[in-house]
Image: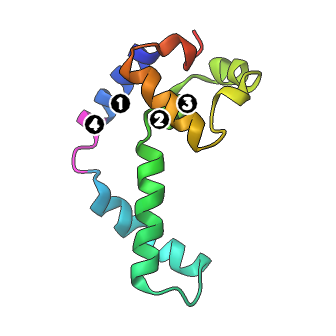
Amino acid sequence: AFRRYQKGVEARERAAPGHSFDVYVANNRAKLAVLSPGAGRGELDAALEANWEAEQHPIRQAYAFLGERDRMRVQKHRRLWYRDAAHDAAVEQAHANREYNDIVPR
């Protein structure tokens, strides 16, 4: 599943080159401004940056890429996904150790 996710990411990057943080900010700044009236531009940009970082997280991307059938299977193991900062750290470590099977269900 992880290799399949990587291939998908590579294909998306080829299909939409230049879909960078700048594009993301341009597309989302106006939406966020509506959702948070009174927030300064710096605050909006900080919020966008945090959200961009989250969306670039390998597990978040892998989850988004899994097919519907896999996703339903994953619902049963939701405790494995976003739990807390300690979990995220464990996920990073598992990736460093190449223990993908603990993270992405096959």
Q: Name the residue carrying label 2.
A: 61
Q: SS at mark 4? A: helix
Label 1 or label 2, whichever comes before in sequence order: 1
Label placed on residue 63: 3
Q: Are marks 2 and 3 in contact (CB under 8 Å)?
A: yes
Disc 4 residue type?
Answer: Glu
Query: Relative to 88, is 103 above or below?
Result: above
Residue drawn at (48%, 68%) of the image: 47
Residue behind mark 1: 9
Q: Residue furthest front?
A: 86
Mark-to-mark CA distance, 1 and 2: 8 Å
Any mark on residue 25, and which?
A: none
For the residues bearing labels 4 and 2, Cβ distance under 8 angstroms: no
Give, as a single range, the part of the protein colored magenta. Answer: 13-18
Kind of residue indicated by mark 1: Val
Q: Are marks 1 and 2 in contact (CB under 8 Å)?
A: yes
Kind of element beneath mark 1: helix
Kindly report which numbered mark, 1 or 2, lies closer to the viewer in this rendering.
2
Label 4 vs label 3, nearer the camera: 3
Residue at position x 44%, y 30% in the image: 92
Report the residue marked by disc 4: 13
